[in-house]
């Protein structure tokens, strides 16, 4: 069972989301990574498509996704929806998915760096 989310905050420089969980974990998620890993059907399909078509055109939000966070809202007791600076807001980041992302090297590095700089 995935731990419950107990607190969410932006980093001082507004480039990362810091989530605290009921099991004591404090994880730092770079916003650029969260945006790039959007779990909505459109983003996931385009991201997972093989790129063997040399004429394939990707939407600009996937080539250079806007990672400015314009809003956040809870979705039930199981996830979060982000509204990005480009208006994209269809991805629901479940708590299970966020905990999976915590294992990515970029998230581990950001979390370790924040822990070293914490008072």
Image: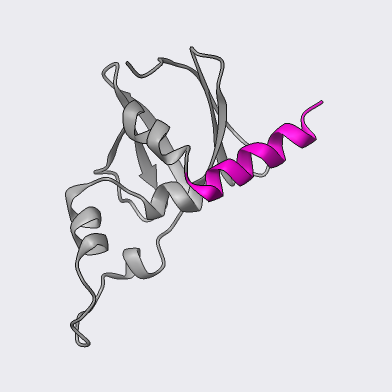
The secondary structure making up most of the magenta span is helix
Measured as percent of width and height from the top left, residue 25 is found at 55, 22
Measured as percent of width and height from the top left, residue 9 is found at 56, 28
Quadrant occupied by the N terminus: top left
Vertical order, 92 against 25 (above or below):
below
Res 12 seen here: no
Measured as percent of width and height from the top left, residue 11 is found at 63, 37
Asked whether 109 falls inside the magenta stretch, the response is yes
Q: How is the image coloured?
A: one colour
Q: Residue at 32% across / 70% down in the picture? A: 60
Vertical order, 52 against 9 (above or below):
below
Q: Residue furthest right?
A: 119
Vertical order, 52 against 85 (above or below):
below
Quadrant occupied by the C terminus: top right
Magenta extent: 104-119
Residue 36 picture quarter? bottom left
């Amino acid at each position: 069972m995935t731990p419950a989310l107990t607190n969410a905050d932006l980093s001082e420089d507004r480039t990362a989301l810091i989530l605290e969980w009921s099991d004591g974990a404090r994880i730092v998620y770079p916003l650029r990574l969260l945006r790039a890993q959007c779990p909505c059907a459109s983003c996931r399909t385009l991201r997972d498509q093989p790129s063997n078509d040399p004429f394939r055109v990707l939407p600009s939000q996937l080539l250079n996704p806007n990672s400015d966070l314009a809003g956040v809202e809870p979705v039930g007791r199981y996830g979060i929806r982000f509204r990005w600076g480009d208006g994209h807001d269809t991805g629901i980041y479940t708590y299970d998915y966020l905990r999976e992302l915590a294992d990515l090297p970029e998230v581990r590095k950001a979390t370790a760096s924040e822990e070293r700089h914490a008072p």
